């Protein structure tokens, strides 16, 4: 496949990412005024990490919405939020991470910086990928279940960990408001440290937050095996050259399967395949093609 065609496909993926980022954070006046958008669309959840406090955010972050629904005066179980996330999971799986997430785009762009890259040893990488399921359980699911019974929600992930919230919400608001800068204490410094560590790691390791820490990535990973949008590998055409695995941002063993929880369906593997063995889209799996479990 020609380099021109390959670049055109990669650029198309980047365009989708940029359009999604603009759609979710398109309130330019918010950044100018340092004010949070409060229009009607703010009651609608987007499918990715998108801080409610971001001055440009036109929609609500699903994790923040979970806490709001359960921590309010009249708490109610957030069936709407969970239903929306499940819908995106069934339709797209982790393609939400690969195509729609603004923080995923930030990591992709940082990885293009001309600095030495590192490959995480398999003995560390594979167990570390389960950390995001622990983050999902400990900072979101268990607090949500506890709040459902007590009416008191604790936004542990948003409060102590989320680097997207610090980048999109915390920093712009502090830059715009000197009063807030004066009030910023140890918690903001801690979250700024987390953000700095993630961004520095992203320059060296492709998508470290997506691989190891993102709770939404863990949630969508549960749907990857049966989502409508998927990749397939024609094992009859595959020559085992390994080009697809060398370009995969999530270090998925593509030739051993594409339906595991780590594939973000970004499509980076498809244009580098010399035999056209990889397909991607909503169409049913063609006859003779096989998909399996990514390891």
Image (cartoon, rainbow, N blue to C red):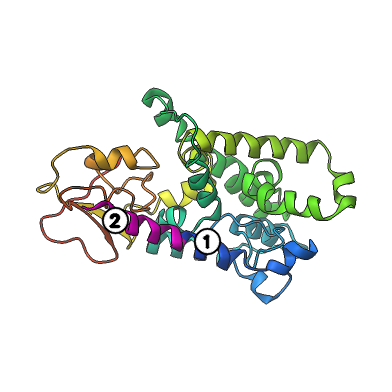
Q: Name the spot of residue 128 as percent of width and height, x first.
A: 46, 31
* Residue at mark 2: 4
Instruction: Place residue 21 in its image quadrant.
Output: bottom right
**Residue 257 vs residue 48: left or right?**
left
Mark positioned earlier in the residue sequence (2 or 1): 2
Residue interval drawn in magenta: 1-16
Instruction: Place residue 173 in its image quadrant.
Output: bottom right
Q: Name the spot of residue 116 as percent of width and height, x first.
A: 47, 29
As displayed, is residue 84 above or below residue 48?
Answer: below
* Residue at horizontal 23 percent and vertical 46 percent from the top: 292
Spatial distance from mark 2 to mark 1, Cα to Cα? Answer: 32 Å
Q: Is residue 2 magenta?
A: yes
Q: Name the spot of residue 267 as percent of width and height, x first.
A: 33, 53
* Residue at horizontal 16 percent and vertical 38 percent from the top: 240
Instruction: Place residue 127 in its image quadrant.
Output: top left
CA neighbours of label 2 inside 10 A, class few (<14), some (14 to 19), many (20+): few
* Residue at horizontal 45 percent and vertical 35 percent from the top: 129
The quadrant in which the C terminus is found is: top left
Mark 2 vs mark 1: in front:
2
Residue 6 appears in the picture as rendered? yes
**Residue 51 vs residue 244: left or right?**
right
* Residue at mark 1: 47
As displayed, is residue 246 above or below residue 99?
Answer: above
CA neighbours of label 1 inside 10 A, class few (<14), some (14 to 19), many (20+): many
Q: Nearer the viewer, residue 25 or 188?
A: 25
């Amino acid at each position: 496949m020609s380099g021109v065609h390959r670049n055109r496909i990669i650029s198309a993926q980047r365009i989708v990412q940029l359009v999604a980022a603009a759609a979710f954070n398109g309130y330019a006046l918010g950044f100018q005024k340092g004010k949070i958008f409060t229009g009607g669309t703010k009651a609608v959840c987007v499918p990715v990490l998108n801080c409610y406090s971001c001055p440009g955010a036109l929609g609500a972050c699903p994790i923040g919405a979970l806490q709001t629904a359960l921590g309010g005066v009249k708490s109610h179980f957030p069936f709407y939020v969970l239903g929306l996330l499940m819908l995106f999971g069934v339709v797209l799986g982790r393609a939400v991470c690969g195509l729609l997430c603004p923080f995923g785009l930030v990591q992709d762009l940082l990885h293009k910086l001309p600095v030495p890259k590192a490959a995480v040893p398999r003995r560390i990488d594979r167990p570390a990928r389960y950390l995001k399921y622990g983050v999902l359980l400990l900072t979101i699911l268990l607090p949500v279940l506890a709040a459902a019974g007590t009416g008191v929600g604790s936004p542990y992930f948003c409060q102590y960990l989320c680097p997207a919230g610090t980048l999109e919400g915390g920093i712009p608001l502090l830059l715009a408001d000197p009063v807030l800068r004066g009030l910023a204490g140890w918690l903001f410094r801690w979250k700024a440290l987390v953000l700095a560590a993630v961004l520095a790691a992203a320059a060296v390791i492709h998508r470290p937050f997506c691989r190891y820490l993102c709770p939404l990535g863990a949630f969508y990973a549960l749907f990857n095996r049966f989502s409508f949008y998927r990749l397939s590998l024609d094992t009859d055409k595959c020559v085992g050259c390994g080009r697809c695995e060398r370009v995969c941002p999530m270090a998925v063993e593509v030739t051993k399967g594409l339906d595991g929880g780590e594939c973000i369906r970004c499509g980076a593997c498809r244009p580098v395949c010399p035999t056209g063995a990889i397909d991607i889209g909503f169409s049913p799996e063609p006859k003779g093609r096989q998909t399996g479990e990514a390891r």
